Image (tube, rainbow, N blue to C red):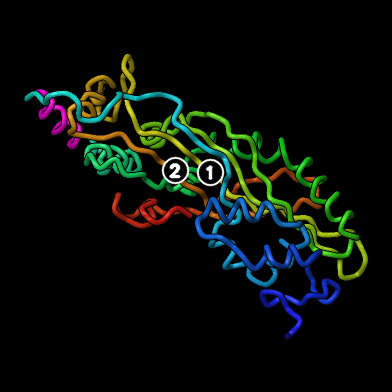
Amino acid sequence: MDGTVNGFNRNPTASPYPSLEEAGKAANMPKGRKAVAEWWGDLDPVTRGILLRERGDELRAAGITAPLYNWKSPDPGSGPFNVEDMTPRDAWLHSQAVAIAAAGDFIGETGASRNMLQYLSGTGETLNLDVDRMLHDDTDFRSGIEQEHLVDNQDAWRQKALDEYNRAGGDKTVIIPVESAAKHRTLRSDEWFHAVGSHAQNVSGMVTVTPSAHGGEPKISLDYQVNVWDRYNWDKGKATEFPGGVTIEDEDMGRLHAVGLAQEFDMRGSSSTYTHDLNGHTAPTVTPGDPGREGTRGDVSRGEEENR
């Protein structure tokens, strides 16, 4: 016998983990982003600190900061897919919508163009949103995230992390997962109003407390990502005005879903990870880099990649 259980020492005093049970849990990371986030949340704060130090890049890529919020579309949209007979007018509407989407790409509303073409393709597949670009383009969206999700929560998150740090003896790195309550808001910039409009949003991440090397105050930092969810659909009784003075009745666009020429779909995405120093008293600011404006809806930089 080598004195270990699943590769971990039987004697917990010889292990950096708080207990043998924690050592076992640390060694069994599940698969799937939501499962990983749940596993991460179930670990001891000290265990998280050890794992992040040893396997930080792997854990971040696996989804330890992924949101646990269970989003569901708040409205039924246009109802069942492909249940009505197509008419010549429906085919004409579809061709007109394709032309409008192409025009949006031409004038720079790439996000709106990409999303409409996804709808008109009829696949119904989930679309990944480029949240970094949304943050860069829409100042109201960015400031809302800063105030409603970061400023409103940072004091409570800091205190909770410090409580865990002191409970662990004040000499070990601890990490607590954090997630703000989801809020339903509407994007206001022209492109993102047309591309997404009303949506659900929140922030998820972690607060890390690291002891000072010289016995001073510990370092406290917040790593977070911005998350967005929406359903691309059309509601009766509404209309959307597009560049060039073109107005589309939502009922007409929704009918394309009912006759099988287009299909509603879910949209979701998460931003890059941002970091904020919680030792000071400055308000957190979201500072996305300029994603650029080159290319078209097919570019990876436009959000076609795997959701971050």
Does residue 107 appear anywhere in the picture?
no
- Residue extending furthest toward the bottom: 1
Q: CA distance from mark 2 to mark 1?
A: 7 Å
* 292 or 232, nearer to the observer: 232
**Residue depicted at x 55% and y 53%:** 35
**Relative horizontal placement of residue 142, taking residue 197 as reference (left or right):** right
**Residue depicted at x 89% and y 60%:** 170
Q: Position of residue 257 (x, y in %)?
A: 23, 29
Q: Which residues are magenta?
A: 89-99
Residue that badge 2 annotates: 268
- Secondary-structure class at tag 1: strand
- As drawn, 241 above or below 146: above
What amino acid is labelled 1 in the image? Asn
Q: Position of residue 60 (x, y in %)?
A: 58, 61
Pointer 2 or 1: first along the chain = 1
- Secondary-structure class at tag 2: strand
**Relative horizontal placement of residue 52, taking residue 243 as reference (left or right):** right
Kindly indicate whether the residue at mark 1 contacts the one at mark 2 (C-beta within 8 angstroms): yes
* 60 or 9, nearer to the observer: 9
Residue that badge 1 annotates: 227
**Residue depicted at x 50% and y 48%:** 270
**Relative horizontal placement of residue 104, taking residue 216 as reference (left or right):** left
